[in-house]
Amino acid sequence: MSSRTSNNSEELNELDWIRVRTKLNDEYKFETLREKMMRKVKQNPIIPLGILATTSALCYGIYSFYVGNTKMSQFMMRTRVGAQSFTILAIIGGWIILGRKNN
């Protein structure tokens, strides 16, 4: 029995990292999808505007194509590319700003 007890204590010493991990997880705050989205929007509020503009231009461009207004459809597709570029620049700008805050 004493060998079994010593084996158990050795296993506990080998698995000491589990206690550390459990302690770290106790301090970690789990957030819901909605809470995470709101936190991200507060960090960089320009990105949702870019996403909205891109989606709007795409939807209206597809609608114009369906109706047969090819001029407006082409214009909206070019507008969509501009809105996508704006969104990408907003993401990169947010990364740069966030990187400077962390340093």
Image: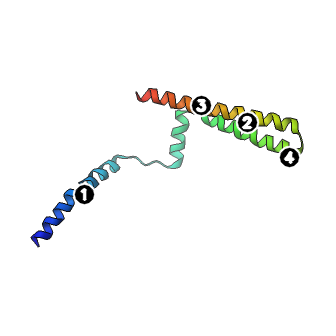
Q: Name the residue carrying label 3.
A: 90
Numbered disc 3: secondary structure: helix
Decide which of tag 4 and tag 3 comes sooner along the chain: 4
The percent position of residue 98, horizontal first and vertical second, equals 48, 30
Measured Cα–Cα span from mark 2 to mark 1: 54 Å
Task: Choose top left, top right, bottom left or bottom right for residue 81.
Answer: top right
- Would residue 96 appear left or right of 48 to someone viewing this image? left
Q: Name the residue carrying label 4.
A: 66
The percent position of residue 39, horizontal first and vertical second, equals 51, 39
The residue positioned 51% from the left and 28% from the top of the image is: 96
Q: Are marks 4 and 3 in contact (CB under 8 Å)?
A: no
Measured Cα–Cα span from mark 3 to mark 1: 45 Å
Q: Name the residue carrying label 2.
A: 80
Measured Cα–Cα span from mark 2 to mark 3: 15 Å
Numbered disc 2: secondary structure: helix
Q: Name the residue carrying label 1.
A: 15
Task: Choose top left, top right, bottom left or bottom right for residue 89.
Answer: top right
Q: Are marks 2 and 3 in contact (CB under 8 Å)?
A: no
Decide which of tag 1 and tag 4 comes sooner along the chain: 1
The residue positioned 45% from the left and 26% from the top of the image is: 100
Decide which of tag 2 and tag 3 comes sooner along the chain: 2
| Quadrant of the frame with the C terminus | top left
Decide which of tag 4 and tag 2 comes sooner along the chain: 4
Q: Depth check: 26 or 82 in front?
A: 82
Neighbor class of circle 2 (other Cα within 10 Å; few <14, some 14-19, many 20+) is many
The residue positioned 52% from the left and 34% from the top of the image is: 43
Numbered disc 1: secondary structure: loop
